[in-house]
Amino acid sequence: MAAFAVRRLGSMVAVLFAVSVLTFLVFNVIPAYDPAEEMAGKGAGPQLVQSIREEWGFDESLPQQYLAMMEKVLSGDVISYQGQENVDQRILEGIPATLSLCVGAAVIWMFFGILFGYLSAVRAGGLLDKSLTILAVAGISVPVFWLAAVMLEYLSYKTGIFPAKGYVKLTEDPVEWANHLILPWIAVAVTLVGLYSRVLRSNMLDAMDEGYVRTARAKGLSERRVMTRHVLRNSLIPIVTIFGLDFGALVGGGAILTEKIFSIQGVGFYAVESIENLDLPPIMAITLFGAFFVVLFNALVDIAYAFLDPRVELGSSAR
Amino acid sequence: MASEPNAESGPAGASPWGLALRRLRRNRVALAFGALLVLIVAFVLAAPLWAEQVAETGPNRGHTLEKIEVDGQQREVVDVEGRPIGPVWLGAGGKFFLGADGRLGRDEMVRLMYGGRASLFIGFSATLLTTVLATVLALLAGYYGGWVDSLISRVLDTIWAFPVLLLGIALGIALALGGLKIGPLEIPSGSIWITILIIGGVLVPYMARPLRGTVLSLREKEFVEAAVAGGAGPLRVMFGELLPNLSSTIIVFFTLGIANAMLFEAALSFLGVGVQPPDTSWGSMVGDGFELIGSSPLLTILPGTMIFLTVLSVNVFGDGLRDALDPRSKVLLEAHAGIAEPEGTPI
């Protein structure tokens, strides 16, 4: 088991390396521009451009440029060219807001995703199932900014039920914190509720055909007990897997649109700000940061899976 | 086979495609949304007609200082405080049907129609690109296995490791600044082909991974063995034997992929790294309108609603198509979750 975890973490490092190389290519090789000039921003003097060129090693060979970039990222030395801020510092400052958004949304989407999926599967083919399916497909299809705009217009600007924008720190005022986050939580959760309820529904319908369900019924267990203790429980495992991945992606800056629309000063908001300033170093750092979280949670899910389900380890020829 | 006389009387003698078509025809909900999709396409195709005959303006023409006659009254297109005129419906003979789009005083209705052309075109072309790339990669990886499979899978894993929107933004901003130049292929910055390439490329792993799994399982079937024994070469097996067996899966992936690509395009354009001005798409209209959301919410909600309706109808129709093509559809449903997985959906 420990060996599996170590190997899995080893492959995680390999993927992270590949990810950093791809990021490097995206910013320094693929586009047809002089990276030093773009980093310096509009209206920069030739001296600034030259100093950036030397600092990042843009006049050297590609592997050396790559090493220079990674050295800066890993030592926390990336400086934005707009405002000369330390990028790593800004990302760290954004994490509490991003986490607040993601954790709250995760509670909502897991609760309603599992509830709707369960009801849909138990009443498969019925009216409730059909209505929930329509809701789920609508949820999957709705663009987050449309939902956010409609909620802002009707629940905030017109009626004043919720505050329109901004983020209040949890440590400052927990009530206002939650009050400011309710609409963003819903905006993030809706798509995922739709998706998770659909996945759970199909998993449960498959599980109902399994032998252990027949056994449980034959034992004389009540239908409700069969559904919750046997069918639901076994169908939740894949849900937990995709939850780990989705949560990692969200924390890694995946909720950019929601953070922008509701002015939540998290990591994604910083990304948008940098896009508007055409400020490349922060975007590069945030891209790496986001990929890091996806890869990390991916590995954690795999390891947790191996602990929960011994067959996984055997299946991957671990011995 | 479907053209044989007895094809209409019952399942006997009907081809799989004929059966699928029959199942699709019975699915009224899917057909209704398919019809909605056709309406939306007709709406955007009519853009030049409306622009020239009714609105008498173009999508990028400003009318800031002009006045129009609405029901006999003179009204400014953009008032002194910079607020655009709201919907006047047919009050001005079809001009400014949905009002103006902001400080520049462009016709919102005309922009909505032209913007939809860009959104639908990008969604369609990007998905076509994704589907072709994903299919070829999945066939190569699944057929050859070994180091070819490892190499392809590692590359896909690397792209998949990025939160999809972040990678799209990174590419969008890098290419929007400098344009693309790889060998003879040169695309100037600001071209919508850059957006198409970005979306088409970034979404490849989300389609290629489930397809590869399907190819791997097909590879073990007897008909492949038989073809190999019959002397068929790799190309023949991949494209003559495996591809036809993937076709229904690919059709479903392609349809559902359009929905995802359109949401992705909208997100990129909303953030300013997709379609570049003066061109417009529904996503960039939402982005422009968002700055006026307090005073003119319609400018955000209208293009947003168009995206919603289009994506919804693509999803419902694609769902019906999936049910029709493969009633068992277990594999496909999981794969659909894979394609629509939130990492592939911009939030």
Image (cartoon, rainbow, N blue to C red):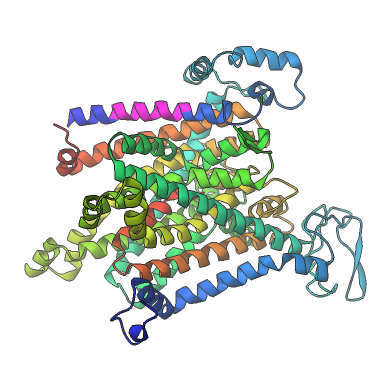
User: Residue A144, can we see it?
Assistant: no
Residue A92 at x, y percent in the picture: 50, 28
Quadrant location, the C terminus of chain A: top left
Whether residue B87 is situated above or below residue A168 in the rendered picture? below
| Span shown in magenta | A9-21
In the rendered image, residue B200 lying in the magenta stretch gets the answer: no
Residue A42 at x, y percent in the picture: 74, 27
Residue B4 at x, y percent in the picture: 36, 82
Residue A57 at x, y percent in the picture: 58, 14
From the viewer's side, name the closer residue of A142 and B216. Answer: B216
Please name the residue shown 67% across and 65% down the image.
B44
Please name the residue shown 67% across and 24% down the image.
A83
Locate residue A314: give its quadrant.
top left
In the rendered image, residue A11 lying in the magenta stretch gets the answer: yes
From the viewer's side, name the closer residue of B155 and B307. Answer: B155
Q: Is residue B187 left or right of residue A171?
A: right
Whether residue B37 is situated above or below residue B295 in the rendered picture? below
From the viewer's side, name the closer residue of A212 and B227. Answer: B227
From the viewer's side, name the closer residue of B156 and A118. Answer: B156
Q: Is residue A135 left or right of residue A306?
A: right
